[in-house]
Amino acid sequence: NAGVMQNPRHLVRRRGQEARLRCSPMKGHSHVYWYRQLPEEGLKFMVYLQKENIIDESGMPKERFSAEFPKEGPSILRIQQVVRGDSAAYFCASSPSSAASGRSSYNEQFFGPGTRLTVL
Amino acid sequence: QKEVEQDPGPLSVPEGAIVSLNCTYSNSAFQYFMWYRQYSRKGPELLMYTYSSGNKEDGRFTAQVDKSSKYISLFIRDSQPSDSATYLCAMSAGTGRRALTFGSGTRLQVQP
């Protein structure tokens, strides 16, 4: 039973380029969350999505950042015109829907291995 | 003031010791409390999950939540060198507000 998958694991971009980070949730999970971990800082929430819907984007920077979770395929976190300050580890987490939670609570979030973005 | 406060450590203990890790928080809306373990350059791994106040035990790990004091704890019994990692507390208000708010993490080093 595969866990949360993220790719690429490492991504290097030059200033001004675009970065696309992908996340496939655990099997049976329909909720996806993105978090960012800056060097020497804690994890900060960015956005919470269900299939085809953004539920909470209160942690997303207002410019250059966007996220989607299409009906088919992985969730995508997109960063346009990257700057050096975007260098960080980006983690995706997933949780089941309340109807499908079964033994686990739908509030439990399971994390992927992260994508480490380096902006040169 | 941060919503969730956690002593960053590092905390160094000998193998076999009981470890106590703690977080305090200020938002009374938090109802769901989690502890994660994160090894260097890896993703956080969910260790314990509790809802509201009370205790929960799983193997060598015990999580305690005291909502009246806004204080949560994680105890690790018979600590092992493999427990050396950063421990993160996290919490959320739950349904409709699932975003986790994390503490800054406590680095634990268990000496063999």
Image (cartoon, helix red, strand yellow):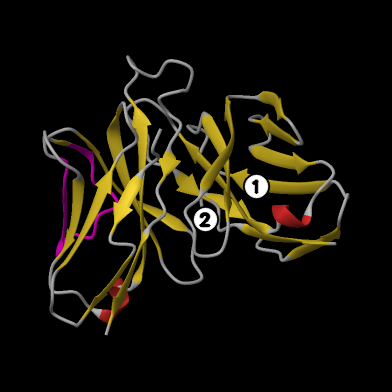
What amino acid is labelled 2 in the image?
A: Lys
Tell me if residue A61 comes above or below residue A33 in the rendering. Answer: below
Q: Which label sits on residue B23?
A: 1
Tell me if residue B31 comes above or below residue A63 in the rendering. Answer: above
User: Does residue B65 appear to the left or right of B4 in the view shown?
Assistant: right
Residue at the location (67% across, 39% down)? B71
Q: Earlier in the sequence, mark 2 or mark 1?
A: 2
**In which chain is the residue bearing label 1?**
B
For mark 1, give the secondary structure. Answer: strand
**Which quadrant would the N terminus of chain A be assigned to in this image?**
top left
Q: Nearer the viewer, mark 2 or mark 1?
A: 1
Residue A44: give x, y in percent of width and height.
40, 55
For marks 2 and 1, give the CA distance.
Answer: 11 Å
Residue A51: give x, y in percent of width and height.
17, 32
Q: Which residue is mark 2?
A: B2
User: Does residue B36 appear to the left or right of A54 in the view shown?
Assistant: right
For mark 2, give the secondary structure. Answer: loop
What amino acid is labelled 1 in the image?
A: Cys
- Packing grade of label 1 (10 A; few <14, some 14-19, many >=20) is many
Which residue occupies the foreground of this view, B78 or B23?
Answer: B78
Q: Quadrant of residue A77?
A: bottom left
Residue at the location (71% across, 52% down)? B83
**Which quadrant would the C terminus of chain A be assigned to in this image?**
bottom left
Magenta highlight range: A54-69
Residue at the location (39% across, 19% down)? A101
Tell me if residue B107 comes above or below residue B69 in the rendering. Answer: below
User: Does residue B61 appear to the left or right of B78 in the view shown?
Assistant: left
User: Does residue A17 appear to the left or right of B40 in the view shown?
Assistant: left
